[in-house]
Structure formats: C-alpha cells, structure tokens
Image (cartoon, helix red, strand yellow):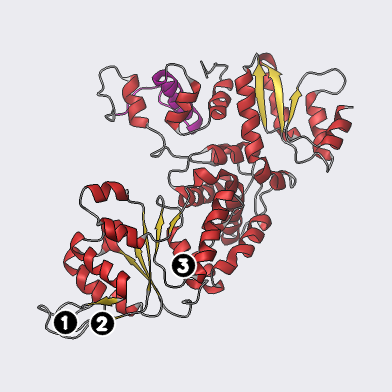
C-alpha cells in the first residue's frame, strides 16, 4: 500500500523505518528505487541505535541519509530541509544510479555558451556559468543586459575564485565590441613606479630609458574592452587620471603635451572592501561610483549550492577524459559532503577537490573519503583552538598539540572541530553551525555516527 501511495503522490522526500512488519525498510527502498516513478525520491532511514551496523545495507539500497532513535524533531526537520534543498540538483544524478555523467551539466553549459564566443569558451572554460540556481541566473541576466550596453563601465565584485574574469569576457565577447581587443590587466601586479607609463603610455624622452614612444594599455584596448582586475590596488595617484578617461575618453601619456582619445569600455573587478578603502583614503569615492554605474556580484559557491552537483559532474567528465578513464559514479555521501562544504576557495577549490578525488579513487566510485575538504576562512579554527586551550589568548592561533590522539583522517578532524564549536557555543547547535560555516544537519549527522547528541538547537 505504501509503495502504491508513493507512486501516486510522488512526495519530495520519504522517511522510512528500518524495522517494519512484512517488508523491511531496505527492501521497501529497493522497490522504490526500482520504480521509475519513485526512483528519484530521497529516502531517509529511521533506525534504532542498536540497528546501526545494519545500515551498510541501507545506502546500496538507495538511501541518502539516516536518523537514529531517539531523535529530536529539530534534527529530523534539518535533515529533511537539507534534502529538499539539494533534491532538484541531485535527482537527475540519482536516477542514473548516482553515476555523475556530465551530459546534464554540459547541456546546461551549451545553453549558456552564447554568452561567450566558442573560441573564448574553449580557452577559458565555462565552469563559472554551469548551474541552474536563481543566484546564477540573476548574474546571467545582468551579463545579457550589459552585452547590449557597449559603453557603460562595469564593476564586478566577489570573492577569489568566483569567475569574475569569466563574467568580464562574457560581457565583451557577447556584445558589439567582440571584434575589438579584450585586454586584461592585473593592477596588483603592476610596479607602482611603472604604473602610469604602462597604463597610459609615454613619449620618447619622457624619462631615462624612454627611447621611443610607447602605447599604454588604454590605447592598446582601443575599440574593445580593458579589464582592470584587482582595481582596488590601483595607486591613489593614478585614480584621477583613470576617472578622466572614464568621463570623456581622454588621457595624457607620460611626457606628452597633447591628449589622446580612446574608444574603450572599462570593466573592473575586485574582492576589496571598497567602503573600508574609501574611509581609509585608499580609493576615491567618485571613481568608485563612476566604475560601479553597473555592478555585478559574482556569487560565492556556498550561495549557489544547488549548482554544485552539476559543477562536480562537469569536472569529473573533464578530468576523466583527460586521464583516458570512464566517468566514475559518485556516492551520495560524497555528493552531500560537497554540497555541505562552505567552499572558501569557490569554484576553483571545487575543481581541485574533484581532480584529486578522481586520482585517489583510481577512476572508480568517488566516495566521501576521497574528498579532501580543507578548512578555510569559513572555519574559525584558530578561535576554536584557543577556546579549548585555557592558557591561549582569545583569537590567537595556538600551535598544534603533539599528542598521540591527533586526528588520523578528515572525518575525525571534523568531529574535533564540531566538538570545539559546540563547546564555544555552550552546546547550541545553531550557533556552532554558524561558527563553522556549515548547516545544523551536518553536525547532527557527524554526531549521530558516534552516538553523541548535539545539545540545544
């Protein structure tokens, strides 16, 4: 009867007790997964603590998670919310027995390749544009608008690794300036003493060693787009000159007496805290407003978690093809670990994690143990360490203790961090999750594996 009801109503998630009269939970799950109509529904097992060893049957049967009795209502709700959130992205993958074949991701990418020329897409990749999240779609809508507005300056903000240059290239190559040059310049890499000459050019005799006239980046980008990456590092002395170019397209090369005019579009990018820089006198407010006539925010990966399965699929196929291997399947526990990670390094970090996982798995099934998810800025490790050391100064990093009980793997290390976070948060799971940059469900899941409870919520 339950199987028939599930097939007719197709719920978003199923909670399934392991021990039931007649068919047990595992056989029921196997039958759900054998039916095309219910195959993609996430199944969460409910099991008593003494039944835990039998759960090795549960995941091969098709389960995605489990809750142990006795349980708190908040824990069950957290688990259900997690799987409701990731279900749309994982459904297509689970229907193929979790074999992350990247066709879905590649079809999504193909539909978005019109944002870039084929040549540029092949060269620079389309990873930053793979996904179906509303967050990403808003970025793509902004890109499409800017492709048609060929003169307005653009400021792209966002963390490192979020694809700011890819957005800039999409704006250029999808618009009327695509036949002109796209010239990327990293402002943080330009020596201060050469910055003015490199940007605006110089005339012969302007300074010692200037034996010929030299065009600067602004003139070289004429008719196209000048991409000023890390614009927050632009020397303050040059910022008025940059503002002048943005205002009327004119500038004066070093040593020249006659201005030059250029027809360019300036797209700038930075992960800087501009209000802080402006308050400190390190960046001109008028330049900031002029650059940011249209601002695009490149979202961090943690804000578009539903795109992670598609990105993982894309990278799996990419690296498997390079290595001459078939695309391996990915277990649900590995996929959940990817979705639950805060990704301080964003898409670039995910790419590295998938490549290493493929190497460590030997091209076979990707499991959670193959994923090396490193703690980053979202994990206040130093603060948590100091909280557990009575003599340590608050907020200061503590040297690692040379003890025999040092964690031997990532799972143990994660448990240590969670225990410390709970101690710091006086047992409050929500606060501990906030400190670690993860969701509550992940804490409950880790603690359940050891039979511990999570304190208050």
427 left or right of 186?
A: right
Query: Marks 2 and 3, Cα distance to the nearest angstrom?
Result: 26 Å
298 left or right of 337?
A: left
The residue labelled by disc 2 is: 260
The residue labelled by disc 3 is: 169
Name which residue lies at 54% across and 46% down: 304
The residue labelled by disc 1 is: 256
Give the percent coordinates (x, y) of residue 103.
68, 58
Q: Residues within 10 Å of mark 1 (few under 14, many from 20)?
A: some
Task: Magenta stretch: give its range.
Answer: 399-425
Name which residue lies at 40% across and 25% down: 406
Q: For the image shown, how many numbered marks are present on the structure?
A: 3
Name which residue lies at 58% across and 45% down: 361
Q: Magenta includes 419?
A: yes
Camera-side residue of 321 and 137? 137
Which mark is first along the chain, 3 or 2?
3
Specify the quadrant of the image occupied by residue 85.
top right
Query: Marks 2 and 1, Cα distance to the nearest angstrom?
Result: 9 Å
Quadrant of the image containing the N terminus: top right
Q: Magenta includes 431?
A: no
Which mark is first along the chain, 1 or 3?
3
């Amino acid at each position: 009867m339950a199987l028939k009801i599930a097939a007719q109503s197709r719920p978003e998630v199923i909670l399934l007790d392991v021990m039931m009269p007649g068919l047990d939970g595992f056989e029921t799950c196997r039958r759900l997964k054998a039916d095309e109509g219910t195959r993609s529904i996430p199944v969460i097992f409910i099991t008593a603590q003494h039944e835990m060893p039998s759960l090795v049957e549960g995941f091969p049967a098709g389960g995605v998670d489990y809750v142990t009795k006795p349980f708190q209502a908040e824990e069950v709700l957290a688990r259900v919310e997690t799987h409701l959130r990731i279900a749309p992205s994982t459904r297509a993958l689970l229907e193929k027995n979790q074999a992350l074949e990247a066709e879905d991701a590649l079809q999504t990418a193909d539909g978005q390749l019109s944002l870039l020329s084929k040549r540029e897409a092949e060269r620079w990749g389309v990873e930053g544009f793979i996904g179906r999240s509303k967050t990403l779609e808003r970025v793509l809508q902004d890109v499409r608008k800017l492709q048609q507005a060929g003169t307005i300056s653009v400021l792209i903000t966002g963390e490192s690794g979020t694809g700011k240059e890819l957005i800039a290239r999409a704006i250029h190559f999808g618009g009327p300036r695509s036949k002109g040059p796209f010239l990327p310049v990293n402002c943080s890499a330009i020596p201060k003493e050469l910055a003015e000459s490199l940007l605006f050019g110089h005339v012969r005799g302007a300074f010692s060693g200037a034996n010929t006239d030299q065009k600067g980046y602004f003139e070289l980008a004429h008719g196209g787009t000048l991409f000023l990456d890390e614009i927050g590092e632009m020397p303050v002395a040059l910022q008025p000159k940059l503002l002048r170019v943005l205002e009327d397209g004119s500038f004066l090369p070093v040593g020249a007496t006659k201005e030059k005019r250029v027809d360019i579009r300036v797209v700038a990018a930075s992960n800087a805290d501009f209000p802080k820089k402006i308050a400190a006198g390190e960046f001109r407010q008028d330049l900031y407003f002029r650059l940011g006539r249209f601002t695009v925010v490149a979202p961090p990966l943690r804000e578009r978690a539903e795109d992670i399965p598609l990105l993982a699929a894309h990278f799996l196929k990419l690296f498997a093809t390079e290595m001459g291997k078939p695309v391996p399947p990915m277990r649900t526990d590995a996929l959940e670990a990817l979705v639950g990670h805060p990704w301080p390094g964003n898409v670039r970090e995910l790419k590295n994690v998938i490549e290493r996982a493929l190497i460590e798995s030997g091209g076979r099934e990707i499991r959670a143990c193959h994923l090396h998810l490193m703690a980053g800025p979202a994990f206040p490790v130093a603060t948590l360490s100091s909280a557990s050391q009575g003599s340590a100064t608050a907020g200061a990093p503590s040297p690692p203790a040379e003890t025999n009980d040092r964690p031997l793997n990532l799972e143990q290390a994660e448990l240590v961090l969670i225990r410390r976070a709970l101690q710091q948060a006086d047992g409050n799971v929500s606060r501990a999750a906030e400190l670690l940059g993860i969701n509550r469900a992940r804490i409950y899941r880790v603690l359940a594996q050891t039979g511990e409870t999570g304190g208050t919520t």
